[in-house]
Image: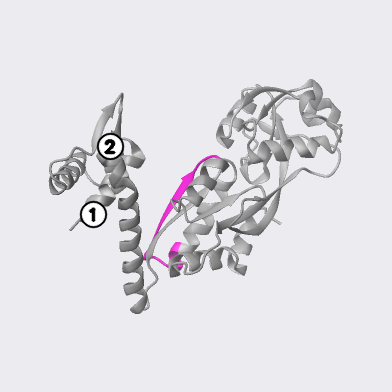
């Protein structure tokens, strides 16, 4: 009989690519991880499950064969555990939530922290990744819920709008544009810009907003592309260029960055809560989903700047 703890350790090594990283993720020591993998290999008839490729541990052919079944068995065990705990009136389980690397990683922790105070037996994981990767992981059931800043048209998804937030144009302290009132959008054709990665939801939002102001993507001069809100602000401080950032990402103090008064209505991005459309969601997942749409969560999001 396969041990689910051994399987969880096996999956952690697959997902992280090393025994040491898996140990950190599982709050174990590296020798303990090695011991668990060795025990699993012995139980399967001394079959090697990993081989080293460069600096990564990758599954062997036998490891690949085990992988799909291992995920299914672990998920089945977790659901059984949740069902038994639910009989005792306790909401428990593991939920993996995903978001992109801009204001999403600032919004979600506020909500997850409050949810945890209400359901302390629920184990939460937050994954930060590009939108396409999150959607693929959602389809593979590796992630339970995701929050994205763009409406999706993939089939089989439940999608609910959480709110909208303004995007603010920022520049380095000392930029003459900070002192001007109602800077015309056309001036962006002449400025170096720091933009999100090409093809990302936020990049599309910015380009569409500027297109409505007669500034086409071909008119822009990006000097740096990054999905990191921290990287954007640091680059603006260094004087590399101007950038649009979600209002929630603005530092509480000026700290080398100032806002530019761009003429016209502000650009904004919408936020959506997304999950797979299917019946029989585990209770912990349904509780988190309902919480994210509750008046309590709405108040937290409003304080963060969502309308």
Q: As rendered, which of 262 and 218 lies closer to the eye? A: 218
Q: Assign a secondary structure to mark 2.
A: helix
Q: As rendered, which of 252 and 15 lies closer to the eye? A: 15
Question: In the image, is residue 146 above or below residue 91?
Answer: above
Question: In the image, is residue 28 above or below residue 206?
Answer: below
Residue 192 lies, in percent from the top left, at 72, 22
Residue that badge 2 annotates: 61
Q: Are marks 2 and 1 in contact (CB under 8 Å)?
A: no
Within 10 angstroms of label 2, few (less than 14), some, or many (20 or more) residues? few
State the extent of the magenta-drawn residues as a range.
116-130
Residue that badge 1 annotates: 5
Question: In the image, is residue 5 above or below residue 102?
Answer: below
Residue 85 lies, in percent from the top left, at 33, 73
Residue 113 lies, in percent from the top left, at 47, 58
Residue name at image x 26 percent, y 51 percent:
7
Residue name at image x 63 percent, y 33 percent:
196
Q: CA distance from mark 2 to mark 1?
A: 21 Å
Instruction: Give left or right: position of 181 versus 30.
Output: right
Of callouts 2 and 1, the N-terminal one: 1
Residue name at image x 20 percent, y 55 percent:
2
The answer to whether one can see residue 5 in this image is: yes
Q: Is residue 294 magenta?
A: no
- Which label was assigned to residue 63? none
């Amino acid at each position: 009989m396969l041990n689910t703890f051994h399987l969880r350790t096996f999956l952690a090594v697959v997902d992280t690519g090393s025994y040491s990283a898996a140990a950190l993720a599982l709050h174990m020591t590296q020798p303990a991880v090695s011991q668990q993998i060795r025990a699993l290999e012995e139980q399967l008839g001394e079959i090697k499950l990993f081989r080293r490729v460069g600096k990564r541990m990758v599954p062997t052919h036998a490891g690949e064969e085990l992988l799909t079944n291992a995920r299914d068995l672990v998920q089945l065990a977790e659901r059984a555990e949740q069902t038994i705990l639910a009989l005792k009136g306790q909401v428990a389980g593991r939920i993996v939530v995903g978001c992109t690397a801009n204001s999403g990683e600032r919004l979600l922790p506020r909500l997850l922290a409050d949810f945890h105070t209400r359901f302390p037996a629920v184990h939460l994981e937050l994954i930060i990744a590009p939108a396409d990767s999150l959607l693929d992981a959602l389809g593979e059931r590796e992630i339970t819920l995701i929050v994205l800043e763009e409406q999706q048209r993939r089939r089989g998804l439940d999608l609910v709008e959480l709110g909208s937030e303004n995007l603010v144009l920022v520049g380095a302290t000392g930029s003459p544009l900070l002192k001007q009132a109602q800077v015309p959008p056309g001036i962006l054709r002449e400025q170096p810009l720091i933009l999100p990665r090409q093809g990302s939801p936020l990049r599309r939002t910015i380009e569409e907003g500027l297109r409505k102001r007669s500034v086409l993507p071909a008119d822009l001069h990006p000097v740096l592309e990054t999905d990191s809100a921290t990287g954007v602000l640091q680059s603006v401080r260094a004087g590399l260029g101007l950038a649009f950032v979600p209002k929630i990402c603005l530092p509480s103090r000026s700290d080398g960055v100032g806002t530019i008064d761009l003429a016209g209505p502000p650009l904004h991005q919408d936020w959506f809560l997304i999950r797979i459309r299917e019946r029989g969601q585990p209770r912990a997942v349904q509780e988190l989903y309902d919480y994210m749409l509750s008046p309590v969560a709405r108040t937290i999001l409003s304080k963060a700047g969502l309308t």
